[in-house]
Structure formats: structure tokens, C-alpha cells
Amino acid sequence: MLSTPLAVEPRPAGGAALDQVLGVSAASTVVFAVLVWVAWAHRTRRITWLRRLAERAETTVGRPGWVALPGGLLAVALLTAFLGFIWDVSLHAGVGRDEGPLANPAHYLILVGLFLTFIAGATAMVLPLDEVPGPAAVKITRTWHVPVGGLLVAGSGLYALIGFPLDDVWHRIFGQDVTLWGPTHIMLIGGAGLSLIGVLVLLREGDLARGTTAATLRDLRVRLSWTAAFGGLLVGLSVFQVEYDFGIQQFRMPLHPMMIAAAAGLALVAARVVLGAFGAVLAVLFYLAIRIGTAVLVGPVLGEAHNVFPAYLGTAVVIELLALVAPLYRRRLLFGAAAGLALSTVGLTLEGLWVEAAFVLPWTSDMWFEGLLMSVPVGVLAGMVGALFGTALTSGEIPGRAVCRTIVVAGVIVLSVSLGNGLYATVPDASATVELTDVVTDPAARTVDARVTFDPVDLPSDDPTWVQITAWQGGGEGVVVDRLRETSPGVWETTRPIPVHGTWKTLVRVSDDRTLAAVPIWMPADEAIGAEELAAPESFTRAFVPETSILQREKNADHPAWLWNVSCTVVAICSLLLLWALAWGAARVARATPRPTSAVRSTDERPPARV
């Protein structure tokens, strides 16, 4: 089994071993040195092979070489990084932390994918020699102009790459935060996922460089590239929801529909505006092909923890139906707002049917009111931003800077407030008495049935979001999530045997309204963090504690609070700067788009919509 080498204890709970840090640093230095040499040699015409590759890609794809070649590189990069990412999450869920960045095979795929993302953007920047790559090109020197999309892809890739060494520094200071939403983890996945916005801008610049003022979709190759880019953007935005996909989320449930509404509003509304009829559905079908293929490869093929994912088909259908209302569709901002409202209500209701059928922890009526309060404003503003983005990639007739800035800033603020509300959780002054009945008595493979009695008995409401037992990080045996059944008031029982041996970490978890708390059942000794074994006797009573104190047991609290706050603030500022750069790039391309007149508009071009 591929995860076996990772099951060897002990593993460090801080940063990686110095030899691995030096190895990655040396390899990175060599790669960057080679990239600089290739760029210099191409710009000074000392090599011709890069130009020939671009010409071949241009012939194959039907776009300028400085679009086609970097676009192909980015496709390989992001597929590689996404496979590595899902594999990595599966490994950490089933095995726990690893011995360092080079001890986890998935990290190699992530690192290669991030490097290739940066290389793709850099390639788009250095390729143009005797041309200005479109009217939005940025002047670097007197004779060197680079496409905006290349800058955005390279910047996103660099942002993600910087997260890799910072992640090691973060772990050395704050210990292991075993969660997708660690600040440096957000840098890694956010930079890679948002690079798709850069490639969409690059595709548009390719159209403008060829003299088309609107997207020309009659060429199947062109349509496929747009579809893949929007589907890829949806994949990138769905990454933030992956803990819910595995059933090991460390956050309250109302965040889940809100994140789905945000992703659908941005990616699918823009896809419908650019691609026209069935554009949102086509983007979702591409997204599903990637997600299904990756899930099958990581789960059944590699034998790691399996995952499911949102379908997005309900939200796509809602957007497509609204687009049939021609007067609404022609007014892009109004269409984006209406689509956002519809997908965050009707669309999420349809999505809930899939979540109920496929997810380990389905949505419940307990979370819908708060979930809609968060999802509707986020969905409306995400739909408006998606409409702006789609318009920027077609006619370019976006509103004035003040209007665009207001919509984007309002979207970021509403999203941030919703995230803050969703992350806020309370721990009740309560306890649980756990009675265990052995199913397998061998200490090396012990499993138990559990009977849990809460004090007070009304701790979870009549319809809690979840009452379950999670067991994970058992050494490559996957994840166990058992939704408990209530047999009498305040008494809950398991429906399957639960592991309480070896490296498993097993706990009772309760989520109800704003409550998000847990009671540990079994915790192994962990020499690296100085933690003693927490035994699982036949009967015991323990108080509820914050879930993160168990799920993120390796975190180090031995640091001043201001250091944590400053570090998180720096990461947040850098993330906002990346979002600003992406918005600037899209607006620059939109404002550089020539305004067609009715006398010269080609038959391939649609009349500009009113914003």
C-alpha cells in the first residue's frame, strides 16, 4: 500500500527535517536558474526551440502561441497539483501528519504542479518577441510587452509557491494545523485555483490580438478551451470545500452551502455570459469529469480515503433557465444578481438533494436558516462579479471604475463576514458519559460499540446538524464517520464498530446551531508533542471541549497571541492583494477591448449587452 511508509512513528510535529528543507531549496534554486536562462536565451534569440513549440501549439489549438503553449502547460500543472492535493488530503485523513515534505508522495505532485503553474505564466510573458500581445499588454521594456493574463498566472503561481516554504516556517512556530484552512494552506490552494482567472484573461487577450472584439465560439477548439478554463475555475473554487467532501469538516455546516453559492455565482454565471447557451452546464460537466476521475484514482485505485463532491448541476440549470429571459439576460448586472439569488435558494435546494444522497454528513433543517442568511448575499454579489467578469471577457462594456470597485469590494466584505460568522462556534458547559462494548478485544485491533449519554440531556436539539463519532489517522485505514442514532432522550448509540487502538484518534462530535464541540474517546500517545495516551475504558465521563483541541492536537499554543494575529493578518493582506491584481487584470483587458460599431461588427460577434 502506498501509504505504508508514512505510517512509521514518530513523525515531527513542527517543521520538516533540515535535510529536506535544504533539498527542496536547492532544487528550487536550480529550477529558477534554468527558467531565467531559458527566458534570457529566448528573448535574445539564442534558442529557437521555445518559439517552435509555441508555433506548433498555435497550429494545434488555434490561438496565438503565447496563449496556446502556456495554456497547455497550465492544464498539465493544475491537473497534477489537484491530483496531488486530493491524494494529500486523503493521506492526512487516513495516516495523519507525515515526516516532512519529501516523505509524502502527494507533495511531489503538488510541488511540480505549482512550479509548472508559475512556469506557464512566465512562458506567456517571455514568448512574444516581435509583437505586442494585444491592446491590454503591459510594457516591461521598450521592446518587451507581456500579456496581462501571463502576469496574473505567474503571480498566482508564485503566491502559491511562496506558501510552500512558509508552510514549514508556520509549522515550526505554531505546530501542525491539520486542516485545509490553515493560512499557508490557503495560499497554496488559493494561488493555484485562482490562476484560472489569469488564463481566462489570457484567452481573451488571444482573441483581441487576432482582432476579434467578442468571443468567437464557432471554432470547436476555441469553445473547448473556454469550457475547460471555466470548468477548471469551478474545480479550483471547489477545493475550499474539500473537508466537507471527506466528511471531516472542522467548521459548522452553514459554511458549506455558502461556499457552493460563491463558487457557482462567480464561475458559472461568467461561463454562461461567455459561452452562451448551455455554457454553465458545459463548465459543470468538465468539472465533474475532473472530480470523478480524481476521486476514482485516489480512492479505489490508490486505496486512500474516498471523497464525494458537490454536483453543481442544480445551480447550473437555474442559471440556464434564467438566461432564457432575454430582457433580464441583456442587462448583465441584473442577470448576475438574479442568478445569484436563484442559485443560492432554488439551486442550493436542488444541490441539497445530492448532498443528502451522497455525503457522509448531509445538510439538515437545523442549518438552513443561517445557511441561507449567509448564502443569499454571497450568491447575489458573486453572481454580479461573475457577470462583470463574463462581460469583461466578451464585449468589455463594463461599468465605470467606481461601480466595479463597489461590487467587488462589497463581495469580498460580505464573503469575509459570512466566513467569520460561519467560523464562530461555542462550546457548551456539558459532558458526555460514554459506555463502550468491545467488538474486537485484541488491544492491537480493538473496536467497540458506544453508548453516549449527554448531560444535560437536551444538549443537542430535536434536529441537530450532526451527532457522530469520527475516527481518523489510523495508519492508512481511511476515515470512519458514524452518525449516531438517538435511542432515548439524550442517549445516542453507534451503528457500526469504532476503532480505539493504534494511531487512531476517536472522538464524539456534536454540531447544533452554533455549538461545535467534542469529547475525546481515544487518543494515542504522541512523543513529538509530549502528549500521553488518553485511554478508552469501558465507561467514562468527560467534558466537552473545542473540536480543534482534538482534531488539531499538534498545534502549538506556546506563542504570544500577537504573533498569531500578525501572521494571519499578513497572509490575509497578501490574499487581498492577489484578488486585487486579478480584478485589475480583468478590468484592464475589458477597457482595452475596442468597441465595435454596427457597421463593422462581424457575424461571429454578438451585440454588446447592457450592464
Image (tube, rainbow, N blue to C red):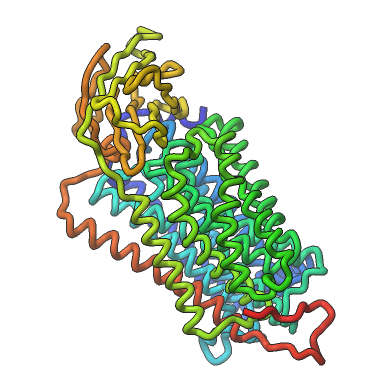
Q: Residue 381 location in percent, x, y?
A: 50, 66
Q: In the displayed structure, does residue 186 sit left or right of residue 211?
A: left
Q: Between residue 454 and residue 182, name the one nearer to us.
A: 454
Q: Is residue 160 left or right of residue 383?
A: left
Does residue 584 lie above or below 360 as drawn? below
Q: How many labels does the image show?
A: 0
Q: In which quarter of the image is residue 300?
A: top right
Q: Which residue is drawn at 39% across and 9% down?
A: 440
The part of the image, by quadrant, that contains residue 53 is bottom right
Quadrant in which residue 202 is drawn:
bottom right
The x, y position of residue 544, in whole percent, is 24, 32
Residue occupying image coordinates x 39% and y 31%: 462
Residue 55, horizontal then vertical, whole percent: 74, 72
Q: Give the vertical position of 51 relative to 339 (above or below).
A: below
> Where residue 312 appears, x then y in whole percent?
61, 50
Q: Is residue 316 depicted above or below 222 in this figure?
A: above
Q: Can residue 210 be seen in this view?
A: no
Q: Is residue 295 above or below residue 318?
A: above
| 602 left or right, relative to 476 | right
Q: Is residue 601 in view?
A: yes
Residue at (44, 60) in percent of width and height:
160
Please name whichever residue, 405 or 16, is drawn nearer the observer in this view of the structure.
405
Residue in front for this viewpoint, 332 or 71: 332
Q: Which of 290 and 175 is in front in this view?
A: 290
